Amino acid sequence: MVSLKLVCPSAEETRSVGRALAEILTRGDVVSLTGDLGAGKTTFVQGAADGLGVAEPVLSPTFTLVREYEGRLPVTHMDVYRLDRIQDVLDLGFEELMDPGGILFLEWGDAIESLLPESYLEVELVLAGESEQRSVRMSAQGAAWQRRWRRLEELTTPWAA
């Protein structure tokens, strides 16, 4: 596993990192988002969705659990925070949501790590004190991300810690 650490001084910079990531996302990718409550998981997805050409506002899926958007690739944004059991996730149609034709952004993905595919990107966001600054750690799981890692490092250089 390889990882990199980034620093985002504001919510807009967190969106910008998401936009940068969008440049290398491909069909079937899963991005697992973890970290502090309110650290910017949805903000990150907003930037990535914008980079994928999603025109409509990207909203938190906390209460709806799943939101879907159309861009240059279909985007599914799922939140499993309120689900108590793995079976609840499966009952939502998790396997179908991992559509090989689109991108799945999964908030609190660490809670269902056993269901994640062999290759996925983990993005951990952590608030840095009272400011808007966030620490962002990206970790590649599996061969599909290993092949794109150098390009991801190049794209995120402005935020490198």
Image (tube, rainbow, N blue to C red):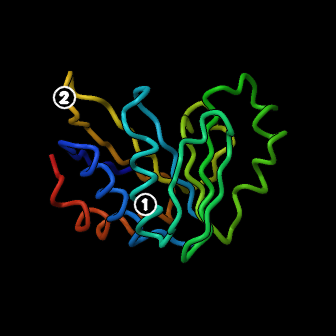
Residue shown at the point (54%, 40%) measured from the top left: 107
Residue type at the position of mark 2: Ser
Residue 64's spot in the image, x, y percent?
A: 68, 39
Residue shown at the point (21%, 22%) measured from the top left: 129
* Mark 1 residue element: helix
| Displayed quadrant of residue 35 | top left
| Displayed quadrant of residue 84 | top right
Does 86 appear above or below 142?
above
Residue type at the position of mark 1: Ala
Q: Give the residue number, with chain letter if any, for mark 1.
A: 48
Give the residue furthest to the bottom: 72
Does 94 appear above or below 110?
below
Name the side, left or right, on which 45 lies relative to 111: left
* Mark 2 residue element: loop
Residue 114's spot in the image, x, y percent?
A: 66, 38
Q: Give the residue number, with chain letter if any, for mark 2.
A: 131
Give the residue furthest to the right: 91
Residue 151's spot in the image, x, y percent?
A: 30, 70
